[in-house]
Amino acid sequence: MLMGAPTKDVDPRLAKEHLLELARLTDTAGGEVVGAMQQRIDAPHPRLYIGEGKAEELREHLVDREADLVIFDEELTPAQGKNLEDTLGVRVMDRPELILDIFATRARSREARLQVELAQLEYLRPRLKRMWTHLSRTRGGIGLRGPGETQIETDRRLIGTRIADLRRKLQDVAAAREVQRRQRQGEFRVALVGYTNAGKSSLLRALSGADVFVEDRLFATLDSTTRAVELEAGYTALMTDTVGFIRKLPHHLVASFRSTLEEAREADVILHVQDASHPDRAEQEEVVDDVLRDLGLADRPRILVFNKMDAVEADAAVALQEEIRARNGAAPPALFLSAHVDESLGVLKETLLARARARLHRIHIRVPAAAGDVLAEIHRDGEMLEQTHDGATMDVVARVPAATAGRLRGRPDVEHVD
């Protein structure tokens, strides 16, 4: 059974969409939704979050529909969760706990599993007493009260130790990731960010031609994936698909995935992918913007990519494009395309190619004819524009990244003509 409790200042249409999204999350987690209720409130009730009358009505619905779990769309305090379970007689979850459960089943890489476990333990630690109370009721409670209290303290210590261990392991993983990033210096890097199920993985698959897992479900992929995307004129972009965002994303989860999202911090450009066909696209865009601000990524070079335009009616597509273009000049540029329409991907590749070229420095150097390693470095990292030789030396005009230009500048056998 799903339960929504939006405050009265929330748009009713958005409140309904939030509950529909909670149903999709429940489906992703493997649950079956047997019903949904909603109560608009002035402010959360300190004891039950919802009113006592609504809680009693919810209990009756649970009995009628033989539901054994209630999932709240709002984040509950440990006390509210315990009081609700006592009142309703069934297990109660909130939205953050549901998202954490989905992440636990979807994480594949070692790093993702460590990150999810850390977030789960951070969420679990203040809720241990509620869990032990639930366990005591299940077993009858006789003789468990004293040992239970002792076990809570023991569990808290064990969880604290495990959290410290996970943080150390994630620091090691982050250090290894930093080494990989340094090795990719000079490469043109692109990060895909966006609301979950906006089509980031589909876009990466279409651009790279690589086998990237795609599924029409929330949080289909959690592990960051990097693939090479061939542009033109010998240019290549290293494109990384990051974990999708969602409204009310648990803050423990954001903190745990911070190292993964560092890929976006190191990228030359961020592609903010949006589902143009979604009725609440504007709210989803705001959610992603908020998370990027929280991560300190709001000032990174960004391109808005409105995906799934093939699913948007012609009039709505024109209105969307006019709306975006009417924004003030400080807004990032925007592209309108579909990952399933190859022709529309060409504009994105051209835009990325222009960004890749813009980050390069034009150099004019003279090197000995035998300095083939210099030419190899230029071909690997940049773009050769002109090359002439007189037998003893070669004059080279090229575009190269700043790091490559710096290395060439430090070589004694390289003469800079201008």
Image (tube, helix red, strand yellow):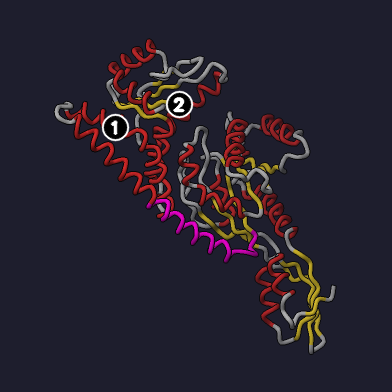
Quarter of the image containing the C terminus? bottom right
Quarter of the image containing the N terminus? top left
User: Magenta part of the protein: which range?
Assistant: 165-188
Give residue 142's quadrant in the image.
top left
Q: State which mark lies toward you, 1 or 2.
A: 1
Is 328 drawn above or below residue 385 in the view shown? above
Q: Which residue is label 2 attached to?
A: 74
Q: Give the percent coordinates (x, y) of residue 141.
A: 18, 27
Visible in this render: residue 251? Answer: yes
By secondary structure, the bulk of the magenta-drawn segment is best described as: helix
Residue 307 in the magenta stretch? The answer is: no
Q: Is residue 128 left or right of residue 284?
A: left
Residue at the (75%, 34%) spot, across then down: 327
Residue 172 in the magenta stretch? The answer is: yes
Label number found at residue 231: none
Residue at the (72%, 75%) spot, across then down: 408
Please state which amino acid type lies under the numbered disc 1: Met
Whichever of labels 1 and 2 marks the residue nearer the N terminus, that label is: 2
Please state which amino acid type lies under the numbered disc 2: Glu
Q: Residue furthest top?
A: 53
Label number found at residue 131: 1
Q: Residue furthest left?
A: 143
Q: Give the percent coordinates (x, y) of residue 181.
A: 56, 61
Give residue 326's quadrant in the image.
top right
CA distance separating discs 1 and 2 = 19 Å
Residue at the (54%, 18%) spot, across then down: 12
Is 309 drawn above or below residue 364 in the view shown? above
